[in-house]
Amino acid sequence: MTTQNLALHDKLWALARNYWWSWQPEVTAIFRDLDPLRWVQLDHNPVLLLDEYTPQQLEDRARETVLHSRVNFAYRRWQEYMESRDTWAGKHAGVLGHRPVAYFSAEFGVHESLPNYSGGLGVLAGDHLKSASDLGVPLVAVGLFYHEGYFSQLIDQDGWQREVYAQVSKDKLPIRLVRLANDEPVVVSVDTRHGPIYAQAWQVDVGRVKLFLLDVNIEQNSIEDRKLTARLYGGDSRTRIRQEIILGIGGVRLLTALGYSPHCVHMNEGHSAFAPLEFIRLRMQEDGYSFDEALRETAAMCVFTTHTPVPAGHDRFDWDLIDEHLGPLGDQMGIGAGGLMGLGRIDPNNHHEPFCMTVLAFKCSRRANAVSNLHGVVSRRMWASLWPWRAEEEIPIGHITNGVHLGSWLAPQMRQLYDRTLPPGWHVRSGEQAVWQDFGSIADGELWETHQSLKSRLIAFARDRMTRRARRLGWNADQVSSIQSCLSPTTLTIGFARRFAPYKRADLVLRDIELLKRIVSDAKHPVQLVFAGKSHPADENGKAILQRIYHLAQEPEFRGKIVLLEDYDINLARYLVQGVDVWLNNPRRPLEASGTSGEKVVLNGGLNCSILDGWWAEAYDGQNGFAIGTGRTHTNQEILDDRDANDLMKTLQNEVIPLFYDRDHDDLPRLWIQRMKRSVSTLGWRFNSDRMVMDYVTTSYLHAAGSVSCDMHRFT
């Protein structure tokens, strides 16, 4: 049967099984229009939705909603997208075509229906894959399949976070088991001193990119080992190292079994740093290299991205764990566990120093980068002891600033404005500055009304989520009804949503409660704040901050003006970044490596109000948002927090609030709208993931593919 003659049922199922649909608004709308209520109830999972229909019922529903022509057009577009060779990478990165980049990450945030992410790192990885697909970059990705995912967050009656883990049903996701030509599942193993750990793989299609997720919940493993990949970032150090040998060593063995021989290996954070070790073993076994020769050749093809500037965020293991899990590999390479320990130590001869995954990644990579300009400075200082013979500014850690995937985060309503204003085909050239030059020509009223509609949509969503929580907790009818008066579409709305880690200071705006009361209750110029975010299950301090915000929101002076939304995920993030007026970000500088949530806000016309840290330190120009302070730090943390809190309130009172409420006779905040336009036109191209991936290709991937021309940073 030709593709033109495929039944509607088959075309819809084909579209549902490739996450390409998730960044195509018109395709997403097809699934939604089949049953808008069920689409929401099923977490926007098209597989679950289609599973509720027989082929005939789908035909009947399609006739009722006039979907046939839309489905045919969507299916044809998808086929053309998948088959096209006229891509950016086709012109600029042809050498990668026959040996694709292998991209490793512990988490991938592709869509809310696939709960394989915890936060920013995973969402960044998902955006990386989508842009690689759009640009036509030959790339395969490797991660782990967590059969309980990351936790769902419930906030109890006292405002305390409760974690709920649910089993992920593989047969209800747009994924499929990876099989060999004989239809047998691909199974790989990693040896330890106490026996092998086995893993099979699931394939997730993300446009043109294949994402393979390794799963140890199979019968070949012991009951203990089958639980290894139950939860993302769960368990103790022994669980963590076993997860990471599966990801790194098992991931390389999977790619080898599938016939991949990558030109370049990209490790997204240190969790996957064991991958180069398996490539070293293969070079020794297949090409007769010594260990040093194989290390040199492997490092030439490896790229490492470090993310966290917080020392505690880097995985470290002691001798016993390394010997148990890497000993067999070390024996095969002729260096033993002791030699491996040296690779993971800053000083190989310091037998008291633990093994660090980040150190291993640096030593096994020719090219390494931080994720913003400032983070590059911090990382070079942080890891300078690895290169004691170099001046700090010569430490070989560069930077490629993070970006976000435009198609995933741009609201469809805002995209219509882009389509009418920017050049034809702008979305396939969004990483180019020239494409964005005409954004300022959008009519002020049209831009403002589009933003207002998105803001009203956010408020409706927030009220619905709060109502569902209230009913779960058994609130009475009057209490539930009062939620409908929470938040006002005409009030300046500030959003704060991210992981509730103490250094991100979600409660900085609460340091002067009396002043905050006056600000939110001002009769002429009121302000309202929307908070969301999860705290790591083991972070009691983060949970306490969340609880404090919850309790404040219940006080009469703040009720309905400060709200805390539970269960922050990609879907909630989408509503927030598309609907707020201002995005608040106030970490302790310089602990925000990059941050990407504010970049999503930019695309939708919101303005950032942020500490000059991470990406904002290189984005703010004085007219495209608001800065908190001048970028100064202090050796005393309490003094720094007080100073930043004072600067935050001054910025709100003296800049943000007056500008928002400065209206003309048409009730339009003209100067505010000017900043919206400047924000989009100056930042939209710089901080999207197309530009980011193009940077990786031109500065890292192509050098790895032609590695003989690169300089090697040695550790001898």
Image (tube, rainbow, N blue to C red):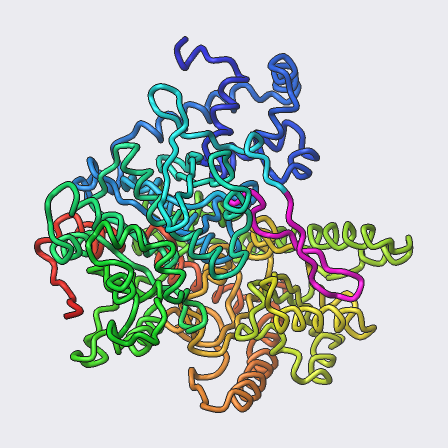
Residue 433 figure quarter: bottom left
Front one among 538 and 137: 538
Q: Nearer the viewer, residue 314 or 415?
A: 314
* Residue 511 part of the magenta-drawn span: no
Q: Is residue 428 left or right of residue 408?
A: left
Image height of 115 relative to 35, above or below:
below
Query: Residue at the location (41% across, 15% down)?
Result: 3
In the rendered image, which quarter contains the C terminus?
Answer: bottom left
Magenta-span inclusion, residue 154 = yes
Q: Position of residue 428 (x, y in %)?
A: 34, 42
The magenta stretch spans which residues? 146-166
The main secondary structure of the magenta stretch is loop
Q: Is residue 481 left or right of residue 252?
A: right
* Front residue of this view, candidates 277 and 641: 277
Residue 616: percent from left, percent from top: 42, 70
* Position above or below: 85 against 524: above
Above or below, 272 relative to 357: above
